[in-house]
Image (cartoon, helix red, strand yellow):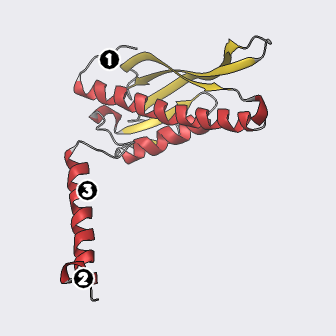
């Protein structure tokens, strides 16, 4: 029995394209924006990023700032604002212990302090502190996976921290005041 004309291959393609177009409209209309993209103040369009210890936070910050249209320079140069992150530290602590004195839950805490100075040295954004944490359960049967899981949590915290810093930078542009 032949397929009805509505289910023929050309009309299925048309329905698929229509569905994708509708999805695009819904996603675009709901306020969805790509991550790592914010509007920075004019005074922060050229930035030198200095992160104590460098590492993943610095790399992600540089990528996010570039995605926002900023020019990131390697060192403090004339005309460049400075984003300084003197403190970026992790701490893992036990949250709960079983009746047999075995740790069953951990918390990974991420503490970051940062500030932004204009090219002339005036403070554009005074010292801000952001603390984030994630909890996870410890499964003795999968002890080897604990280090990998903790590393994934740290990466997730870095991603979220970059977004939080970018939001604070944008709030400085908008003249908004955000609490620590």
Q: Position of residue 28 (x, y in %)?
A: 23, 50
Are dots 2 and 3 in contact, CB under 8 Å? no
Disc 1 on helix, strand or loop?
Answer: loop
Q: Nearer the viewer, mark 1 or mark 3?
A: 3
**Mark 1 or mark 3, which has the lower sequence index?**
3
**Mark 1 or mark 2, which has the lower sequence index?**
2
Q: CA distance from mark 2 to mark 3?
A: 20 Å
Residue found at x 47% / y 36%: 48
Residue 76 visible in the shown view: no
Residue found at x 70% / y 39%: 148
Residue closest to the eye, 2 or 93: 2
Q: Nearer the viewer, mark 2 or mark 3?
A: 2
The residue where tag 3 is placed is 23
- Using a 10 Å C-alpha cutoff, classify the residue at mark 3 as few (fewer than 14 neighbours), some (14 to 19) or many (20 or more): few
Q: CA distance from mark 1 to mark 2?
A: 53 Å
Q: Nearer the viewer, mark 1 or mark 2?
A: 2
**Mark 2 or mark 3, which has the lower sequence index?**
2
- Using a 10 Å C-alpha cutoff, classify the residue at mark 2 as few (fewer than 14 neighbours), some (14 to 19) or many (20 or more): few
Q: Position of residue 139 (x, y in %)?
A: 72, 29
Q: Quadrant of residue 11?
A: bottom left
The residue where tag 1 is placed is 178
Quadrant housing the N terminus: bottom left
Q: Quadrant of residue 46?
A: top left
Are dots 1 and 3 in contact, CB under 8 Å? no
**Mark carried by residue 10:** 2
């Amino acid at each position: 029995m032949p397929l009805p004309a509505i289910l023929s291959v050309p009309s299925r393609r048309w329905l698929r394209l229509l569905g994708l177009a509708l999805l695009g409209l819904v996603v675009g209309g709901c306020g969805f924006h790509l991550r790592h993209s914010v509007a920075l103040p004019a005074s922060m369009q050229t930035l030198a990023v200095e992160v104590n210890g460098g590492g993943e936070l610095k790399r992600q910050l540089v990528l996010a700032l570039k995605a926002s249209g900023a020019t990131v320079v390697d060192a403090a140069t004339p005309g460049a604002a400075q984003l300084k992150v003197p403190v970026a530290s992790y701490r893992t602590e036990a949250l709960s212990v079983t009746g047999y004195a075995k740790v069953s839950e951990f918390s990974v805490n991420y503490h970051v302090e940062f500030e932004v100075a204009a090219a002339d040295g005036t403070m554009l954004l005074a010292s801000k502190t952001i603390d984030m944490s994630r909890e996870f359960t410890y499964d003795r049967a999968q002890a080897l996976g604990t280090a990998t899981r903790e590393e994934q949590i740290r990466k997730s915290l870095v991603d979220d921290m970059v977004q939080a810093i970018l939001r604070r930078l944008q709030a400085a542009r908008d003249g908004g005041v955000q609490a620590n």
